[in-house]
Image (cartoon, rainbow, N blue to C red):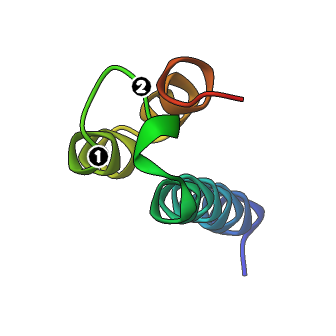
Amino acid sequence: MSPTLTAALLVVVAAAGFAGYCVTDLARADDRDILLLPRMAWVVICVLSVPIGGIAYLLLGRRR
């Protein structure tokens, strides 16, 4: 396997893991811990705009 393909695969796996972490955190959170947007809006943002959506959720969308 070429180094470029290996690096691309690593980036895809890391992005999927980060999105999965954010969605799991959203699924486990109470409704009062989620800020600014409804839960499903955060899920869509986290999945469609990796990693910016996940970073926005972790910084702005949850109380902790």
Q: Compared to 24, does 44 lie above or below?
A: above
Please state the horizontal and vertical placement of residue 23, each as a whole percent of the image: 47, 59
Please state the horizontal and vertical placement of residue 42, each as a whole percent of the image: 33, 40
Please state the horizontal and vertical placement of residue 34, each as a whole percent of the image: 45, 36
Q: Residue at x 25, y 48 (%)?
A: 44
Displayed quadrant of residue 36: top left
Amino acid type, mark 1: Leu
Q: Nearer the viewer, residue 1 or 16?
A: 16
Q: Residue at x 72, y 58 (%)?
A: 7
State which mark lies toward you, 2 or 1.
2
**Quadrant of image for the N terminus:** bottom right
Which residue corresponds to mark 2? Answer: 35
The answer to whether the residue labelled 2 contacts the one labelled 1, judged by CB atoms less than 8 Å apart, is: no
Amino acid type, mark 2: Leu
Q: Is residue 58 left or right of residue 61?
A: right
Secondary structure type for disc 2:
loop
Q: Nearer the viewer, residue 48 or 28?
A: 28
Please state the horizontal and vertical placement of residue 25, each as a whole percent of the image: 58, 56
Circle on res. 48: 1
Q: Disc count in the image?
A: 2
Displayed quadrant of residue 62: top right
**Quadrant of image for the C terminus:** top right
Q: Compared to 33, does 48 lie above or below?
A: below
Q: Compared to 43, does 53 lie above or below?
A: above
Q: Residue at x 46, y 64 (%)?
A: 27
State the CA–CA distance, disc 2 to disc 1. Answer: 19 Å
Q: Residue at x 62, y 60 (%)?
A: 21
Q: Residue placed farthest to the right in the image?
A: 3
Circle on res. 24: none
Secondary structure type for disc 1:
helix
